[in-house]
Amino acid sequence: MIEVLVSEKLVVRVPCAVIEHNGKVLAGQRSPALSFPLKWEFPGGKAEKNESDEEALLREIREELNVEVEIIHKLPVTSKDQGWREIILVPFVCRLNSYQITLTEHEQILWLKPKELPSLDWTEADLNVIENYYEYLSTK
Ligand SMILES: Nc1nc2c([nH]c(=O)n2[C@@H]2O[C@H](COP(=O)(O)OP(=O)(O)OP(=O)(O)O)[C@@H](O)[C@H]2O)c(=O)[nH]1
């Protein structure tokens, strides 16, 4: 009999923020020292145990950008199989509540008009987020 070992895949839930300000959206470039070096992403990060998506998002944004944001809309959850793990992105459209951004993790940030977003080299999972954001904008 052939035995097949089916290992459980790690599933990582990552709330992230599409932060709007003055008609533009914030994109963050990952550090060259991290996984997916220099790829662009929406700021956020892995939720900790017993933390809601919203709590994790607000904490990550404080940690990464040192600003407060307000959640205004939840976009559809999107997932990406990365081989050894599955990333579940939980995106929220947010507005900035404080304006002095201090970067603690990202290489750089850019403020782009929504239509300019596809010009960057995003992590694969984010392409769905951008599509869903456009869908949201079209219904506003
Ligand atoms: N914050 C954020 N993470 C994203 C996005 N898209 C995407 O694939 N990810 C992935 O989700 C994971 C989020 O992890 P994290 O921000 O908490 O910490 P990290 O970079 O050290 O993670 P890692 O070392 O596990 O890859 C990263 O692997 C990141 O590449 C996104 O738009 N925003």
Image (tube, rainbow, N blue to C red):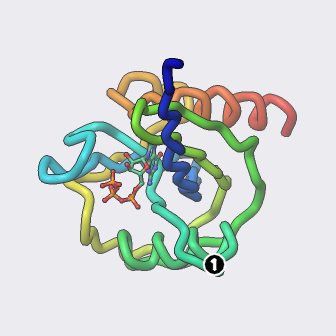
| Left or right side of 138 for 11 | left
* Relative depth, front residue between 106 and 138: 106
Q: Identify which amino acid the numbered label 1 is placed on.
A: Glu
Task: Say whether mark 1 is within 8 Å of ligand 1.
Answer: no
Residue 31: x, y in percent?
19, 52
Residue reaching furthest to the top:
1
Q: State the residue at coordinates (50%, 26%).
A: 3
Where disc 1 sits, the SS reads: loop
Residue 4: x, y in percent?
50, 26
The answer to whether any part of residue 21 appears in the image is: no
Vertical side of 126 occupied by 43: above or below: below
Vertical side of 130 occupied by 15: above or below: below
The answer to whether any part of residue 128 appears in the image is: yes
Label 1 environment density (alpha carbons within 10 Å; few <14, some 14–19, many ≥20): few
* Location of the C terminus (image quadrant): top right
Residue 134: x, y in percent?
69, 29
Find disc 1 in the rendering and name its residue: 51
| Left or right side of 13 for 84 | left
Residue reaching furthest to the left:
33
Vertical side of 67 occupied by 79: above or below: above
Question: Across the whole image, how many numbered discs are drawn on residues?
Answer: 1
The image quarter containing residue 112 is top left
Q: State the residue at coordinates (49%, 40%).
A: 7
Q: State the residue at coordinates (44%, 28%).
A: 124
* Relative depth, front residue between 27 and 39: 39
The image quarter containing residue 56 is bottom right
The image quarter containing residue 70 is bottom right
Residue 30: x, y in percent?
27, 49
